[in-house]
Image (cartoon, rainbow, N blue to C red):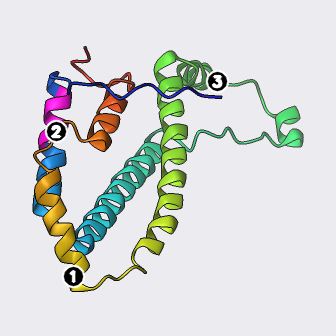
Amino acid sequence: MHRREAVPEEPCQCPDCQRFYREHDRLIRENASLRQQQELNWAALQSFRTLAGRVLEELQKQYGDGEQPAPDSARAASSPPAEPARAGATAAADSPEAEAIQQAMADLENINAHLFSIEVLMERIFDVRVPEEVEQKFREVAGELAPDPLNADRLRLNRLLHQTPDLPDRG
């Protein structure tokens, strides 16, 4: 069973967290209705899928799809040994840089699969329509949340920034 870490009492002051706080608050202030949040999240998801998918396609064109073709056993038995240039290409494919690219491509394929799953779930969000009184409540609450530095959701998401190993300026 996982133990949840307690939400910090004070907001972090590192540059990543400060940037996150500003963006969090801006997105709430500028998209203060349910409909605007639906559209914003859908656009963010689609832009992420588009960019990640295109980068994966480009990497696959440049480096191949990562799968080695199975040699034809009849042809392999009768073909001459690999040429030195081809052997060098195979060795280069086994280099740490090539392995890192292949791992990144596998990670991007997983990201795209996860984003597709999220998209399917998010489509359900668009089924929700609320009366204008509820949209007004969204706008009212947005005005209260955006400047709140101790908002529990914001602090929880902020903690995730510090669990991500590839972000710069971690404290």
The secondary element bearing badge 3 is classed as loop
Amino acid type assigned to the residue bearing label 3 in the image: Glu
Location of the C terminus by quadrant is top left
Which residue in the structure is indicated by mark 3? 83
> How many marks can you see?
3
Give the quadrant of residue 149: top left
Residue found 54% across the figure and 24% down from its top: 99
* Residue 103 rendering spot, x and y as whole percentages: 53, 31
Residues in magenta?
Answer: 16-22
**42 to the left or right of 66:** left
User: Measuring 18% from the left and 61% from the top, which residue is drawn there?
Assistant: 141
167 to the left or right of 57: left
The quadrant holding residue 2 is top right
**Label 3 CA crowd tier, 10 Å (few <14, some 14–19, many 20+):** few
Magenta residue check for 92: no
Near-viewer residue (140 or 46) = 140
Mark 1 crowdedness (10 Å alpha carbons): few <14, some 14-19, many ≥20: few
Q: Which residue is mark 2?
A: 21
Sequence-wise, the earlier of marks 2 and 1 is 2
In-image side of 122 versus 79 (left or right): left
Does the magenta segment cover residue 19? yes
Given contact means CB atoms under 8 Å apart, are the residues at marks 1 and 3 in contact? no
Closer to the chain start, of discs 1 and 3, is 3
Name the amino acid type tagged 1: Glu
Q: Which residue is mark 1?
A: 133
Callout 1: helix, strand or loop? helix
**Residue type, mark 2 in image:** Tyr
* Mark 2 in CB contact with mark 1 (< 8 angstroms): no
